[in-house]
């Protein structure tokens, strides 16, 4: 027995001595993991710092180049046109983005309202069916109560002789009516609880816009993009604006000082003309209806039309019941694809 106790004590001492070692081992492993994570984070931060330093250097080089450019009056005039064109592009891109966002919000609200309306109609049908059952059972309960009251009154009015012979049968009937009413009351409570449960069910959430809604929004946005191209097509402003987003300021030449001043005035005038929101909205509506009959889709689930079906911008499109809507003096179609050429950053807002 003594030897056994010594062995057990020795074993216990061994476990006690290994406990701190195990804790130290796991602590060391945890520290190594944290150190490794910190190293990764440090490398990521250093990479971001290098990217920022590179961006700062490029921005400084651009600023230095612009300063040198502006020392030349003719180059400065061309630079003025260049930045006015970039502003024109941003105006178009902002209109496209805002229009897409507004349309999406409208369609989401409309689809959610339809979803809720359908859910509420289904709820009303379910509640109506339950209410019919409830009214039927309540009518049965009413009949049971009336029969019970009549039997009780009959039993109370019996004389002793009749009560001896007919009383037991009436009491059995009263007992059966009592049990039957309990079952009916229980069923009524179940149906009322089900009604409360149905009334408390949350309305369904939208799972996203339907394909038809996304197609309609995209076509309306494309129609606006085409309208903007037509609006700025005079003096090639739309084309110049696109080029200004692709080339540096020093590579763009627009003529002498007089040409540049004239171009700046035209840009500002055409931007100012966009304030006629009703005219733009009417044009987009007519053009969207026209595009609905012209575009094609690769599959039934695609929401963005095939680019090939948008190769030409018709300056005039037929308005329903109003003949032709004039857009430009010339009737010649404009061979420009706003989708494939990503005019006004169109691709970034399509659904």
Image: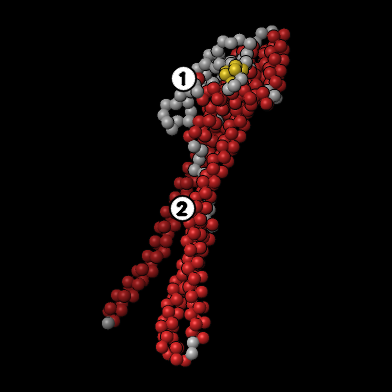
| Secondary structure beneath label 1 | helix
Q: Residue at x 55, y 25 (%)?
A: 289
Q: Position of residue 336 (x, y in %)?
A: 53, 16
Name which residue lies at 39% across and 61% down. Answer: 22
Quarter of the image for the N terminus: give it. bottom left
Q: Is residue 323 visible?
A: yes
324 vs 109, nearest the viewer: 324
Q: Nearer the viewer, residue 114 or 103?
A: 114
Residue 328 lies in quadrant: top right
Residue at image coords 51%, 70%: 142
From the image, tell me which residue sits under label 1: 308
Q: Nearer the viewer, residue 182 or 280?
A: 182
- Reading the image, the residue beneath label 2 is 31
The residue at the far bottom in this view is 160
Secondary structure at badge 2 equals helix
Q: Position of residue 153 (x, y in %)?
A: 52, 82
At which x and y percent is residue 282?
Answer: 63, 25
């Amino acid at each position: 027995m003594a030897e056994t106790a010594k062995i057990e004590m020795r074993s216990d001492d061994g476990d006690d001595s290994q406990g701190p070692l195990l804790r130290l081992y796991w602590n060391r492993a945890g520290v190594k993991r944290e150190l490794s994570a910190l190293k990764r984070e440090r490398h990521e931060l250093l990479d971001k710092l290098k990217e920022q330093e590179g961006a700062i250097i490029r921005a400084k080089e651009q600023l230095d180049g612009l300063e040198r450019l502006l020392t030349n009056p003719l180059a400065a005039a061309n630079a003025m046109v260049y930045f006015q064109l970039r502003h024109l592009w941003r105006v178009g891109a902002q209109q496209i983005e805002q229009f897409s966002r507004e349309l999406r919000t409208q369609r989401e609200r409309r689809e959610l309202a339809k979803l809720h309306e359908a859910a509420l109609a289904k709820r009303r049908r379910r509640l109506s069916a339950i209410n019919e059952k409830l009214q039927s059972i309540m009518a049965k309960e009413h009949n049971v109560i009336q029969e019970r009251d009549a039997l009780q009154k009959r039993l109370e009015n019996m004389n002793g002789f009749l009560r001896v012979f007919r009383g037991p049968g009436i009491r059995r009937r009263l007992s059966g009516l009592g049990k039957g009413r309990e079952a009916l009351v229980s069923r009524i409570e179940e149906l009322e609880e089900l009604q409360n449960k149905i009334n408390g069910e949350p309305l369904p959430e939208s799972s996203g816009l339907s394909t038809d809604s996304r197609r309609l929004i995209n076509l309306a946005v494309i129609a606006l993009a085409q309208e903007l191209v037509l609006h700025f097509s005079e003096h090639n402003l739309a084309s110049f604006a696109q080029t200004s987003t692709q080339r540096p300021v020093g590579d763009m030449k627009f003529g002498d000082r007089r040409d540049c001043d004239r171009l700046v005035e035209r840009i500002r005038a055409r931007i100012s003309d966009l304030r006629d929101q009703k005219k733009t909205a009417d044009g987009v509506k007519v053009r969207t209806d026209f595009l609905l009959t012209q575009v094609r889709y690769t599959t039934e689930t695609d929401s963005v039309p095939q680019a090939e079906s948008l190769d030409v911008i018709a300056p005039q499109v037929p308005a329903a019941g109003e003949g032709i809507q004039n857009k430009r003096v010339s009737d010649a179609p404009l061979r420009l694809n706003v989708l494939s050429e990503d005019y006004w950053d169109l691709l970034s807002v399509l659904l």
